[in-house]
């Protein structure tokens, strides 16, 4: 093998090595753009890959409006700091283990209240609780719109929607 | 789930297949160039090596499609590339360097991949390993102690880390690494709250209670025993580093790292002042080019440095170096041998490939939902990174040289098989992490949940008026997640 061919092969080999590394990194870049897209920019055209597999069942209700609140945060009470990601199916709060947010609180009812989206707006609904659900000093009657950052008192806990 | 059919909707793993082809092409290209630059002919056994490696790599690929269809697509090609490069390097040294043996290396690589496939087949869910927490502890300690048993262990090149069964030798510490990772993950996931919260605060550091420290002290004692009894700096550093790293992952307390570093520094100073072989290692490291040392103890290190310097930026090309000048160029110093022939450009590519593997491990530790899986994936990725640092740091004279092996590259059966098991576990966890689930990932923001029937939008809820109780029932029944899942979300919040 001539000196020139050897040199070319030697450098070509290194190029191929870096082609591998860069294509591996290119595959990884999908992940960075993966499920963490929250602000406005959605994943480009549903890339192949598990994270992008469309949810089964079809006809799932639309997610809450973009730019709307993305999580429910407990800001007071024993569970302070607890964060629950919001989904289109809403959050059920109460003492029953089947609730999305389970409160270990004697002042809350087993199915106390729920917070759910409808038409791009979030609502809170008292589910006939014994001690009531309060926004500020006002007791929630039926279904009331809930803006992000407004505290909802349930038993000893206060929850609020956050962006 | 059907036994032998890919799950519906699972990705076809095209990216993995394409990357595998590139990785195998690099391996074959390396072996081809070795043959043509040394003898101007195909190296002996070229087709055997190529076909066996390709067949095994694609078998593993198919096993993944069947058994872990959502698993990470980059890890396997990256590891196969490293394995192929080491195959080419060792093939290049076979016949030139004493004890370099490509056919044995091929056998061990094949065994490693086969074991990885078996692990993927047998372990369907990484959480089943949690039941083995304390079994793993016992297994780990036994494995570590085995070389100390007279008759079984033997001292080779100053370190007593091998056991001999008949004619074959095994380095049990490589397997102990996995056992300890499983034990630490299981132990810490159960005890992290007491470790993180109980105890007094001293100087702004949350110190743990003494009784919670028990297992930590056991591990410290084990790693000290390794250091003293087996004279193996690297392994003892690896175990202790693994534990401190996983403690930090579990508790998020910087205090643990401080305590760990202090304990390590203390142990290191004591070891340095007591043991002559540790002093020698330090002298070699600080004063490698001392004329008194160059001809003796630091010969290997200095030859390795010269080899890498000869490689320069772009290397001497496959077959262009002088691996016979570096002692153990096929195992402990394979990094220097590769640097000689592929140059800095090649070494950086290899380091990046390792980085990709470690990054994938840590990424899936974030993605997976159960605490045990998080700790196990994080721990395995961390221990690989630490091992890489200790080996490469030792060869490049950043830290004192220790006797660890470069994962997937050094010739040596135990290391290859053990690291393939690590990769199989990582792939298993990554499958769990990436599998689509109605549950949002902890800490991540929610994807639209696949609510099934009667979500709030489908029912007519009159805003302002409404029938509270009925609407509530609907909310309960209509949520996309089952009650159990819902409880899990809330538990999930506890970090």
Image: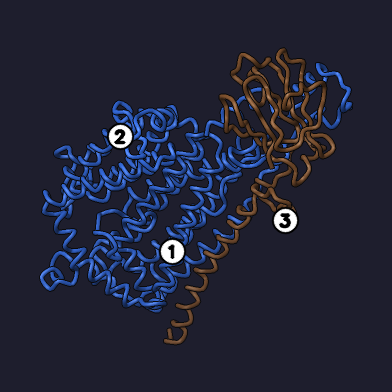
Classify mark 3: helix, strand or loop.
helix
Q: Earlier in the sequence, mark 2 or mark 1?
A: 2
Give the colour in which the image draws chain B. blue
Instruction: Determine whether B462 is above or below B237 in the image.
Output: above
Do the residues at pointers 3 and 1 share their chain? Answer: no
Q: Are marks 3 and 2 in contact (CB under 8 Å)?
A: no
Q: Which residue is mark 3?
A: A44
Q: Chain of mark 2?
A: B
Tell us which disc is closer to us: 3 or 1: 3
Q: Quadrant of the N terminus of chain B?
A: top right
Q: Chain of mark 1?
A: B
Instruction: Determine whether B321 is above or below B408 in the image.
Output: below
Q: Which mark is residue B350?
A: 1
Classify mark 2: helix, strand or loop.
helix
Task: Count neighbours of disc 1 (C-alpha within 10 A) and say few if under 14, some if 14 to 19, many if 20 or more.
Answer: many
Give percent across and percent down for residue A42. Answer: 72, 52
The tally of labels here is 3
Do the residues at pointers 3 and 2 share their chain? Answer: no
- How are the residues colored? by chain
Q: Residue at x 68, y 33 (%)?
A: A160
Q: How far is disc 3 from disc 1 in space, using C-alphas? A: 31 Å
Q: Are marks 2 and 1 in contact (CB under 8 Å)?
A: no
Give percent across and percent down for residue B379. Answer: 42, 43
Which chain is tinted brown? Answer: A
Tell us which disc is closer to us: 3 or 2: 2
Give percent across and percent down for residue B381. Answer: 44, 48
B275 vs B130, nearest the viewer? B275
B366 vs A51, nearest the viewer? B366
Give percent across and percent down for residue A82. Answer: 59, 32
Do the residues at pointers 2 and 1 share their chain? Answer: yes
Relative horizontal placement of residue B72, taking residue B255 as reference (left or right):
right
Q: Which residue is mark 2?
A: B216
């Amino acid at each position: 093998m001539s000196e020139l061919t050897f040199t070319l092969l030697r450098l070509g080999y290194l190029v191929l090595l870096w082609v591998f590394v860069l294509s591996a990194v290119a595959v990884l870049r999908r992940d960075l753009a993966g499920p963490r897209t929250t602000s406005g920019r959605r994943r480009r055209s549903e890339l192949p890959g598990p994270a992008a597999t469309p949810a089964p069942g079809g006809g799932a209700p639309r997610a809450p409006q973009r730019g709307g609140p993305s999580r429910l945060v407990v800001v007071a009470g024993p569970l302070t700091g607890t964060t629950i990601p919001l989904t289109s199916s809403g959050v059920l709060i109460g003492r029953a283990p089947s609730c999305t947010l389970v409160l270990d609180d004697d002042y809350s009812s087993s199915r106390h209240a729920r917070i759910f989206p409808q038409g791009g707006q979030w609502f809170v609904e008292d589910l006939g609780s014994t001690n009531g659900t309060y926004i500020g000093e006002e007791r929630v009657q039926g279904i009331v719109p809930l803006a992000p950052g407004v505290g909802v008192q349930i038993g000893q806990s206060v929850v609020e929607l956050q962006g | 789930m059907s036994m032998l059919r890919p799950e519906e909707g699972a990705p076809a793993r095209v990216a993995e297949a394409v990357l595998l082809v590139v990785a195998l092409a690099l391996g074959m290209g390396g072996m081809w160039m070795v043959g043509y630059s040394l003898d101007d002919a195909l190296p002996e056994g070229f087709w055997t090596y190529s076909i066996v490696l390709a067949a095994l790599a694609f078998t593993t690929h198919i096993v993944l499609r069947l058994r872990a269809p959502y698993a990470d697509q980059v890890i396997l090609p990256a590891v196969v590339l490293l394995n192929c490069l080491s195959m080419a390097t060792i093939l290049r040294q076979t016949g030139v360097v004493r004890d370099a043996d490509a056919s044995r290396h091929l056998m061990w690589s094949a065994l490693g991949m086969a074991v990885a496939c078996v692990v993927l087949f047998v372990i369907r869910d990484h959480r089943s390993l949690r039941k083995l927490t304390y079994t793993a502890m016992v297994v780990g300690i036994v494995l570590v102690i085995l070389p100390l048993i007279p008759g079984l262990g033997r001292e080779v090149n100053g370190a007593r880390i091998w056991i001999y069964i008949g004619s074959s030798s095994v380095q049990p510490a490589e397997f102990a690494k996995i056992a300890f990772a499983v034990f630490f993950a299981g132990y810490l996931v159960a005890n992290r709250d007491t470790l993180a919260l109980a105890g007094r605060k001293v100087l702004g550091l949350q110190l743990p209670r003494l009784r919670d420290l028990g297992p930590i002290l056991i591990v410290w004692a084990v790693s000290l025993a390794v250091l003293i009894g087996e004279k193996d700096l690297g392994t003892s550093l690896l175990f202790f580093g693994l534990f401190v790293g996983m403690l930090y992952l579990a508790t998020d307390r910087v205090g643990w790292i401080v305590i760990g570093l202090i304990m390590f520094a203390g142990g290191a100073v004591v070891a340095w002042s007591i043991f002559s072989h540790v002093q020698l290692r330090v002298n070699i490291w600080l004063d490698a080019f001392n004329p008194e040392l160059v001809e003796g103890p630091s010969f290997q290190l200095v030859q390795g440095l010269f080899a890498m310097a000869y490689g320069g930026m772009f290397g001497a090309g496959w077959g262009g170096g002088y691996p016979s000048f570096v002692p153990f160029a096929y195992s402990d110093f394979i990094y220097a041998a590769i640097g000689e022939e592929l140059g800095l450009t090649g070494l950086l590519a290899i380091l990046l490939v390792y980085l990709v593997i470690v990054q994938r491990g840590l990424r899936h530790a974030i993605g997976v939902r159960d605490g045990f899986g998080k700790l196990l994936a994080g721990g395995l990725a961390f221990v690989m990174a630490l091992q890489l640092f200790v080996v490469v740091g030792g060869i490049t004279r950043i830290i004192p040289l220790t006797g660890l092996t470069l994962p997937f590259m050094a010739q040596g059966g135990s290391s290859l098989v053990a690291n393939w098991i690590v990769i199989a576990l990582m792939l298993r966890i990554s499958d769990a992490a990436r599998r689509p689930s109605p549950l949002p990932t902890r800490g991540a923001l929610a994807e639209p949940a696949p609510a099934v029937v009667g979500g709030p939008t489908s029912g007519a809820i009159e805003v302002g008026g409404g029938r509270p109780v009925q609407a509530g029932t609907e909310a309960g029944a209509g949520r996309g997640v089952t009650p159990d899942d819902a409880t899990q979300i809330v538990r999930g919040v506890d970090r």
